[in-house]
């Protein structure tokens, strides 16, 4: 299985799994949400690489974090938010792939 679906499912599952203990306590729900936000941010931080003259992986890190946000939104039954984030990612991700391919071709032509 790929990383992105796992992040979304785990984030959603964490929210849904704790719903029975946080149902009447918005503060508890907020504390539960902080966990995936922090954890997914840590995973995304691991995707960022600092090279000699550049930093790579920031788009991947942001995409992983956004995928976690989709899972949290679905877990909170905020489907409109999940849809908007998904829609944006589906349009932004192809652009990032095109940019990455263009950068690779540019670097190879410099050699």
Image (tube, rainbow, N blue to C red):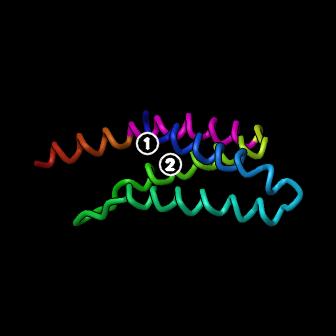
In the image, residue 93 above or below residue 19: above
Residue carrying label 2: 64
Total labels drawn: 2
Report the residue at 68% width, 58% height from top. Answer: 33
Give how far across and how far down residue 50 sits, in percent.
Answer: 30, 64
Report the residue at 80% width, 50% height from top. Answer: 20
Residue carrying label 1: 96
Q: Is residue 3 left or right of residue 85?
A: left
- Residue closest to the eye, 23 or 77: 23
Disc 1/disc 2 C-alpha distance (Å): 14 Å
Q: Residues within 10 Å of mark 1 (few under 14, many from 20)?
A: few
- Residue closest to the eye, 12 or 20: 20
Give how far across and how far down residue 27 sits, in percent.
Answer: 81, 66
Q: Earlier in the sequence, mark 1 or mark 2?
A: 2
Report the residue at 50% width, 48% height from top. Answer: 64
Q: Quadrant of residue 55?
A: bottom left
Name the quadrant of the N terminus: top left
**Range of the magenta residues?**
81-98
Give how far across and how far down residue 107 sits, in percent.
Answer: 20, 48
Query: Tag 1's secondary structure?
Result: helix
- Say which of marks 1 and 2 sits in front: 2
Q: Residues within 10 Å of mark 2 (few under 14, many from 20)?
A: many
Q: Is residue 62 left or right of residue 70?
A: left
Q: Is residue 100 left or right of residue 59?
A: left
Report the residue at 85% width, 53% height from top. Answer: 23
- In the picture as drawn, the residue positioned furthest to the left comes out as 111
């Amino acid at each position: 299985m790929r990383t992105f679906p796992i992040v979304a499912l785990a984030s959603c599952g964490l929210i849904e799994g704790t719903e029975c203990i946080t149902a009447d306590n918005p503060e508890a729900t907020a504390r539960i949400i902080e966990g995936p936000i922090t954890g997914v941010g840590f995973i995304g931080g691991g995707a960022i690489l600092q090279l000699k003259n550049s930093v790579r992986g920031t788009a991947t890190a942001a995409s992983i974090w956004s995928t976690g946000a989709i899972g949290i939104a679905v877990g909170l039954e905020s489907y409109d938010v999940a849809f908007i984030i998904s829609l944006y990612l589906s349009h932004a991700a192809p652009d990032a792939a095109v940019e990455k391919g263009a950068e690779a071709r540019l670097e190879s032509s410099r050699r």
